[in-house]
Image (spheres, helix red, strand yellow):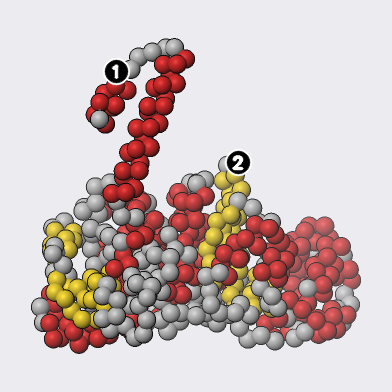
């Protein structure tokens, strides 16, 4: 029947109004039938992984030795499943402690493409829940859910593209086992689907409640785009990375509300620049929040005012430097709003009455409580240097991409960059060399490579209620 309709459509030739409408109707009916048949016969991506548990096992040699020893596998893997498995896949009626029993192997071994380009097969053990009788496959952490390539290959591509600014074309040329750019695009969507806060929450990490926030303006021809980022200064974890086309209060409120829905800890304080729209949005979304203003932004604006002041008054470089030190001392030594007002009153020099400099002193006085907030709350920092550093990497990526015009894809890219940054250890020579932000936050790694840590903590489990 379908072959007959398809052939009829190809042969149909009629320029009449009735003939054209009949052709359109047949075409639409045929397409709807095919779509329904496809949906009925395929399993959604989000529903495949919930019957699979990941356990820590970094190397294939170790796994092949372990999987053949039933008693050891029971003791080292099955008995520990309740400690680190996700909650999906069980029947709604499954209550009480989760206990499992081994029931043999999958009918078909898992095929995996290695870095050499060779394909290898791995036997996969299965367990059954004693309560609800649901069956689950047990995968070592080096085997990704629903991917045909070894997870360490995928992790290296992420690291090169998202952290080291390698282009997708260069990554494809270096990756002999992948034949298409679409493969890499699929991988990027894989790691960028989840918000960084959702991934960290799944991994059992809670924030301190103190963050740095900033918006990066990504200039493009005939387009204004912004990246909204929140980073925890103590652990360097990127908790929020969003892409918006406006930074007005309403848009920022929506971005912050999305972030708030994904965290379980209270946001206590945030360090940011003086952008009024984001300040109002933060106060509206996070009730009772402490907001500290960045000293570096304040000093930068004062330096710019000094440059204009020097051009107008022809003062010496030495005098300009002295005035800067006086302002900086007031800013950094003040401990409260009253302290700022007292110190500003003691500055009686005529230069500070000049309109260019007086504007900066008035701004400091007006926002004194925000500039001295770090004196009252230890978690609030004086500057936004940590979040600014991450935004630099976003700007570098924009330079290579040349455009972030597709909003959904851009959001996925930003989230992928944040997720990668959170789990990849810093390089040798860095202050926290060989440690990732996730490690600094005391996250459980089981001594696995970073991409396997993400896999173990279900960062690639596309089920809404997974944990």
**Is any part of residue 61 visible from this angle?**
no
Identify the mark at residue 222; answer none if there is no mark: 2
Bin the neighbour count of mark 1 within 10 Å (Cα to Cα): few under 14, some 14-19, many 20 and up: few
Q: Decide which of 461, 188 is in the foreground and name it.
A: 461
Relative side of 396 to 77, left or right: right
The label nearer to you, 2 versus 1, is: 1
**Which label's residue is closer to the chain start, 2 or 1?**
1
Relative side of 409 to 154, left or right: right
Identify the mark at residue 337; answer none if there is no mark: none
Q: Quadrant of residue 446?
A: bottom left
Q: Residue at x 53, y 77 (%)?
A: 264
Counting labels gives 2
Q: Quadrant of residue 89?
A: bottom left
Relative side of 311 to 23, left or right: right
Q: Secondary structure at mark 2?
A: loop
**Is any part of residue 266 visible from this angle?**
yes
Q: Decide which of 44, 259 is in the foreground and name it.
A: 44
| Residue matched to label 1 | 11
Q: CA distance from mark 2 to mark 1?
A: 46 Å
Q: Secondary structure at mark 1?
A: helix
Q: Position of residue 429 (x, y in %)?
A: 39, 76
Bin the neighbour count of mark 2 within 10 Å (Cα to Cα): few under 14, some 14-19, many 20 and up: few
The image quadrant where one finds the C terminus is: bottom left
Q: Is residue 308 above or below residue 419?
A: above
Q: Residue at x 33, y 73 (%)?
A: 90
Q: Quadrant of residue 442?
A: bottom left
Q: Position of residue 267 (x, y in %)?
A: 61, 77
The image quadrant where one finds the N terminus is: top left
Q: Residue at x 49, y 75 (%)?
A: 236
Circles 2 and 1 in contact, beta carbons < 8 Å: no
């Amino acid at each position: 029947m379908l072959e007959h309709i398809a052939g009829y459509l190809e042969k149909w030739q009629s320029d009449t109004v009735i003939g054209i409408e009949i052709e359109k109707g047949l075409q639409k009916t045929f397409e709807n039938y095919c779509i329904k048949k496809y949906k009925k016969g395929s399993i959604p991506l989000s529903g495949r992984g919930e019957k699979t548990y990941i356990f820590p096992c970094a190397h294939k040699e170790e796994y092949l030795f372990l999987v053949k020893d039933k008693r050891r596998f029971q003791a080292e893997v099955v008995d520990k499943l309740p400690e680190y498995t996700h909650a999906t896949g069980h029947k709604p009626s499954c209550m009480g402690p989760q206990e499992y029993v081994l029931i043999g192997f999958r009918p078909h071994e898992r095929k995996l493409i290695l870095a050499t380009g060779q394909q290898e097969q791995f036997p996969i053990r299965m367990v059954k829940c004693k309560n609800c009788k649901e069956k689950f496959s047990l995968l070592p952490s080096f085997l990704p859910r629903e991917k045909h390539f070894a997870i360490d290959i995928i992790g290296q591509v992420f690291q090169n593209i998202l952290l080291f600014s390698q282009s997708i074309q260069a990554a494809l040329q270096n990756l002999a086992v992948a034949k298409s750019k679409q493969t890499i695009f699929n991988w990027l969507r894989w790691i960028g689907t989840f918000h960084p806060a959702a991934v960290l929450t799944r991994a059992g990490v809670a924030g301190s409640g103190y963050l740095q926030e900033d918006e990066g303006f990504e200039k493009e021809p005939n387009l204004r785009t912004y990246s909204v980022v929140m980073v925890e200064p103590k652990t360097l974890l990127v908790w929020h990375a969003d892409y918006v086309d406006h930074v007005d209060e309403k848009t920022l409120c929506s971005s912050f509300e999305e972030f708030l829905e994904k965290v379980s800890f209270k946001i206590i304080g945030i360090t940011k620049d003086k952008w009024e729209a984001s300040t109002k949005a933060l106060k509206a979304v996070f009730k009772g929040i402490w907001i500290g203003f960045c000293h570096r932004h304040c000093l930068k604006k004062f330096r710019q005012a000094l440059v204009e002041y020097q051009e107008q008054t022809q003062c010496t470089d030495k005098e300009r430097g002295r005035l800067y030190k006086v302002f900086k001392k007031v800013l950094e030594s003040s401990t409260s709003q009253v302290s700022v007002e007292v110190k500003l009153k003691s500055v009686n020099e005529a230069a500070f009455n000049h309109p260019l400099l007086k504007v900066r002193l008035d701004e400091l006085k007006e926002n004194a409580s925000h500039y001295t907030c770090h004196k009252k709350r230890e978690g609030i920092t004086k500057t936004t240097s940590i979040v600014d550093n991450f935004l630099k990497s976003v700007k570098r990526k924009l330079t290579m991409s040349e455009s972030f015009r597709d909003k959904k894809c851009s959001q996925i890219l930003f989230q992928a960059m944040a997720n990668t940054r959170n789990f990849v250890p810093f390089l040798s020579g860095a202050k926290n060399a060989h440690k990732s932000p996730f490690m600094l936050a005391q996250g459980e790694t089981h001594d696995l490579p970073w991409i396997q840590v993400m896999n173990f903590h279900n960062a690639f489990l596309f089920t809404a209620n997974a944990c």
